Image (tube, rainbow, N blue to C red):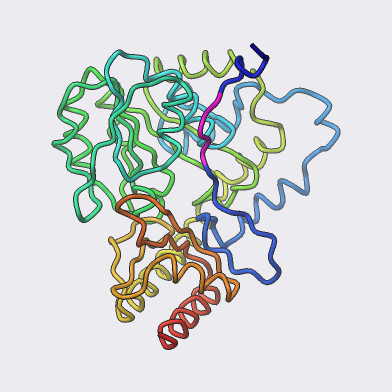
């Protein structure tokens, strides 16, 4: 007998690499290549550091109100947390406590099975179709909850609002969580469905569209009852999770949404240009509605391309997992970065 027997053991989520390489082109963690906006920069300059001696507003009331106005919701339909990963963790704890299995795709955000194992939630991974899209009828079954990203990660594929509504209609006794981390890069949000379906919860992040991966802000939107239970769970861990500076930056970002949308449009245009050129070079991919591409070459393996790109100072994401071990996920960077990526790919192909 020893103290080690009392330790909780789990297989943790593996985050994207944050390499410390000079002159690196980093296209592996879906960070936004453009800045967070002038209002955010000004908010940082104007921030009163003396206020850090005081605890922050536990409910992030100003930020919550700004998000509610922005999305046409009531304040008590909004939950704020330390990044969408914390919001997801609290959602799993709050919403998925039934006896039946939680359902989510087999190819999806790899944090989902980690939460399930950590919290002892039974789950089933539902296979995507061959084109990496969700078959909605697969979710017309008895379950303890449903969660999926839309657009999906790491594929970038999207489900229509009509298909999501069909899943909601067929699962009125379950909570359906739609993870919209990438929705602002070309998809249609489920937010309009909140007024019709009280079993819907939507999760968003400030990391991608709003270029704020470094401050850790996330939000959930749903009916008032679900949101109140989320706050009960949050307050059972930490009453002050979102710090004062993050709240100020988040509030400024919401006020700067128009300029941020222009950056998202740049990313969309670059994505479409790069995907077209990659297809000409022998790559295939699902049509992406996110800020990344999920690519596979018709003759060269993903692992080989990953290694060769890295030798040239370009880091992308390789998933050594069933069904997707011959795909690379490539974040959309600036036009300059993507031109370097394309030229390097051409050089690699020319050597073979």
Q: Is residue 215 left or right of residue 297?
A: right
Q: Which picture quadrant has residue 245? A: top right
User: Picture coordinates of residue 247 (x, y %)?
Assistant: 65, 35
Q: Nearer the viewer, residue 315 or 223?
A: 315
Q: Is residue 218 left or right of residue 327?
A: right
Q: Nearer the viewer, residue 74 or 133?
A: 133
Residue 274 belongs to the span the image colors magenta:
no
Q: Is residue 335 left or right of residue 313?
A: left
Q: Residue at x 21, y 29 (%)?
A: 168
Q: Residue at x 59, y 47 (%)?
A: 213
Residue sitting at the far front? 1
| Residues in magenta, as a range | 9-13
Residue 11 belongs to the span the image colors magenta:
yes
- Residue 176 vs 232, above or below: the answer is below
- Residue 190 vs 209, above or below: the answer is above
User: Picture coordinates of residue 291 (x, y %)?
Assistant: 43, 58
Q: Residue at x 54, y 57 (%)?
A: 32
Q: Residue at x 19, y 54 (%)?
A: 130
Q: How many marks?
A: 0
Q: Nearer the viewer, residue 107 or 184?
A: 107
The quadrant of the image that shows the N terminus is top right
Q: Main secondary structure of the magenta part?
A: loop
């Amino acid at each position: 007998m020893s103290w080690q027997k009392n330790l909780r053991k789990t297989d943790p989520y593996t985050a994207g690499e944050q390499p410390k390489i000079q002159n690196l082109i980093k296209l592996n963690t879906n960070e936004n290549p453009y800045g967070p906006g002038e209002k955010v920069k000004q908010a940082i300059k104007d921030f009163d550091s003396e206020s850090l001696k005081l605890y922050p507003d536990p409910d992030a009331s100003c930020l919550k109100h700004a998000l509610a106005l922005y999305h046409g919701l009531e304040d008590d339909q909004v939950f704020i947390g330390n990044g969408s990963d914390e919001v997801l963790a609290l959602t799993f704890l709050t919403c998925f406590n039934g006896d039946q299995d939680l359902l989510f795709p087999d190819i999806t955000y790899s944090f989902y099975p980690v939460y399930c194992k950590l919290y002892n939630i039974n789950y089933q991974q539902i296979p995507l179709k061959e084109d990496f899209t969700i078959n909605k009828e697969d979710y017309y079954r008895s379950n303890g909850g449903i969660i999926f990203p839309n657009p999906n990660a790491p594929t970038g594929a999207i489900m229509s609002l009509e298909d999501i509504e069909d899943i909601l209609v067929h699962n009125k006794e379950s909570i359906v969580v739609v993870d919209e981390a990438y929705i602002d890069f070309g998809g249609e949000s489920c937010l309009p469905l909140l007024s019709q379906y009280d079993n819907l919860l939507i999760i968003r992040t400030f990391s991608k569209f709003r270029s704020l991966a470094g401050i850790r802000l996330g939000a959930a939107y749903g009916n008032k009852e679900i949101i109140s239970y989320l706050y009960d769970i949050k307050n059972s861990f930490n009453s002050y999770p979102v710090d004062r500076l993050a709240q100020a930056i988040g509030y400024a970002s919401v006020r700067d949404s128009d300029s941020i949308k222009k950056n998202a449009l740049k990313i969309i245009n670059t994505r479409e240009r790069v995907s077209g050129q990659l297809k000409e070079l022998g790559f295939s991919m699902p049509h992406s509605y996110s800020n990344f591409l999920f690519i596979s070459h018709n003759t060269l393996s993903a692992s080989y391309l990953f290694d060769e790109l890295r030798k040239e100072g370009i880091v992308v994401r390789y998933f050594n997992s069933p069904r997707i071990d011959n795909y690379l996920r490539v974040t959309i960077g600036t036009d300059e970065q993507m031109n370097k990526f394309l030229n390097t790919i051409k050089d690699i192909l020319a050597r073979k």
